[in-house]
Structure formats: C-alpha cells, structure tokens
Image: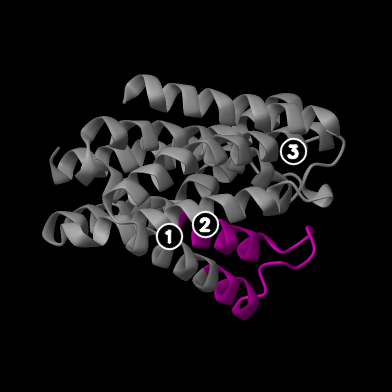
Amino acid sequence: MTLADVAIYATLAAAAAALGPLLATVRGPDEPLIGLANALAAGVMLGLAYPMMRDGLDADAISATLGAGAGVIVLFLLHVWFELDGPEAMPPMRALFRASVHAVPEGLTLGVACAMDPRFGLLVAFTLALHNVGEGIALTPHLGRGEKPARAAAAAALSNAPQVALAVAGFVLAEAYPTLRPLLLGGGCRIARLSLAGRLAPRRIPGAGRTAISVVVIAATGMVAFAEAAG
C-alpha cells in the first residue's frame, strides 16, 4: 500500500461525516435519531477494538499494554484541559473541536493498520467511515438551528481533517519504525473503548433506550465477524 492510497482511504472516511448532517436534515435531528447515531458510532468502534488489540498483543504484549495506558492518560488530559466533557448543549466550535480531538487517534490507528496489512487498513477505513456518519448525525444539533445543510455537512467533514493528517503520519511512522506498531495499536484500541463508554452515557442516547444497546451489540458483533472474515 502506498502513501497516496492511505491518504485516499483516510479522506474518504473523513468525508463520510458529511452524510450525517444531510441524513439528519432529511429526517430531522430528533432525539431518537441522535441516540441511535451515537450507538452506531460506539458499536463499530467497539467491534474494531477487538482486532486492533488482538494484533497489537500478538506483535508485542508489553508495548500494546503500554500504548493502551498512554491512550487513557492522553485522552483524559485532553478532555480535562479543554473541558470537553461539558454539557451537551456546547457551542458549535467546541463541539467541532471535540470531534477533531477524537479524530486524531483514529487517523493514527488507520495509518498503522495500513502499514501492517492492506486488508486490515481497508477494514479500519470502512469502520471509520461508518463511525463518522454516526458522529456527523450526532454533531448536527451542535451546529445551530437553521444552519444550511451544505455548511453543516462541510463542517462535519472538516472536523475530521486531523484524521487524514494523522493517518498519513501514522503510516510513515509505522513504516519507518515497525517496532512502534503494537504501541500505537494498543493506544488506538483503548481510546476506541473509551469513546464507547462516553457515547453510551444516558445523556448521549436520548430517546433511544434499549434500542441503542441493541444497535451497539449488532454493530460490534458485525464488525468482529467482518474482521475475522477479512482476515
């Protein structure tokens, strides 16, 4: 896989977020839709976490574990420093910044996955695309009432720009220093699981109830099965 391929995969995955506001515009960003979107985003990332940690542990258990610990610390510090765990009714710029912060480790994981195995890279890119659609829907209420769909779609896609940059950087880093791959995969896996925990908080799945849990289970199970079949 070439660097250009990685950039294309990452760009397509990031651009998928633009579908979120457009879908929300068709139906209207009601609470059940937002809740199910968060559940979908959480489920696919949970499913992706399994092959990520499995491959990381198989390559180097100690490095993967250290990466997981570092991922927890870094994400916690970012949330505290930038106050990203505030009320759901946060200003548009802060909501977009929060999405961008979460896009950083996702992009890094994509780059490392592409360096390890092209098929694994495709799986991660596909998963991130699904995840980004859900994130785009969930982001729509924060962009303000009456916002033009095209502008909301562009904002959602641009919030994932770090995903593209870090995918390229992660690929270059993993190609140059293969010993870092388990460390980076461990960190990406742990951050994916933390993202799941945050998205399943009651305030993040309003109106969806038990259906949201079903969506998480189905999405996660489907991703694991797909990963096993692709592997």
| Residue position marked by numbered label 1 in the rendering | 187
Q: Could you tell me which residue is drawn at 54 percent across and 23 percent down? A: 222
Q: Nearer the viewer, mark 3 or mark 1?
A: 1
Residue 170 or residue 13, whichever sits in front: 170
Q: Secondary structure at mark 1?
A: helix
> Disc 3 and disc 1: Cα gap in Å?
27 Å
Identify the residue position indicated by label 3 in the image.
34
Mostly what secondary structure, the magenta segment?
A: helix
- Give, as a three-letter code, the residue at label 2: Ile
Residue 96 falls left or right of residue 176:
right
Q: Quadrant of the C terminus?
A: top left
The magenta region covers: 75-104
Which residue appears farthest toward the top when viewing the image?
Answer: 229
Relative image position of residue 120 (x, y in whole percent): 30, 34
The quadrant of the rendering that contains the N terminus is top left
Residue in the picture at 48% in, 45% down: 157
